[in-house]
Image: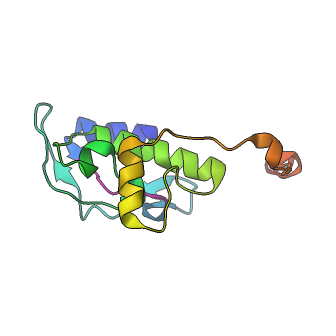
Amino acid sequence: MIIAIGYLHNKGIVHRDLKLENILVDQDGYLQIIDYGLAKMLSEEQEAQSFCGTPEYLAPEMVNQSGHDKGVDWWAIGVLIYEMLIGVTPFFNKNKNVLLTKIQTAKVVFPDRKRYKIDYSDQIMDLI
């Protein structure tokens, strides 16, 4: 994912809607980023002003509409990693207004691992 986003950014493309649903694995096991409907071409010094994307993955600068650049994709990668590790996005809330406020003001909290008694070691060994 990191290499793919870096490549897009080098070409001046900001995806702006990275989320798990927009990442597929092809028949050879390679990741494919899909759905470029919200993508935008930006030069290094440009900022976009539009408000778009999936709320759970929006960066604070997108939420407060102060202008955004390629950083919104890096924020979304962080949200994706958090979601893959924890199972839910870091600021999730059913109420969209609360969600957007949390994106702007809340600290990222990682749950206490001791509360979870999930042992993935057997599953990992099966993959090796």
Which color scheme is applied? rainbow
Q: Quadrant of residue 52?
A: bottom left
Q: Is residue 16 magenta?
A: yes
**Is 24 left, or right, of 71 in this rendering?**
right
Q: Residue at x 47, y 42 (%)?
A: 78
Q: Residue 65: x and y, percent?
A: 18, 49
Q: Residue 84: x and y, percent?
A: 60, 51
Q: Which residue appears farthest toward the right when viewing the image?
A: 122
Report the front residue among 99 and 90.
99
Is 75 drawn above or below residue 63 in the view shown?
above
Is 19 drawn above or below residue 59 in the view shown?
below
Report the front residue among 102 and 57.
102
The answer to whether residue 40 is seen in the rendering is yes
Q: Residue at x 81, y 49 (%)?
A: 116
**Is 126 left, or right, of 12 in this rendering?**
right
The answer to whether residue 128 is seen in the rendering is no
Q: Residue 91: x and y, percent?
A: 48, 52
Q: Is residue 41 magenta?
A: no
The residue stretch that appears in magenta: 14-20
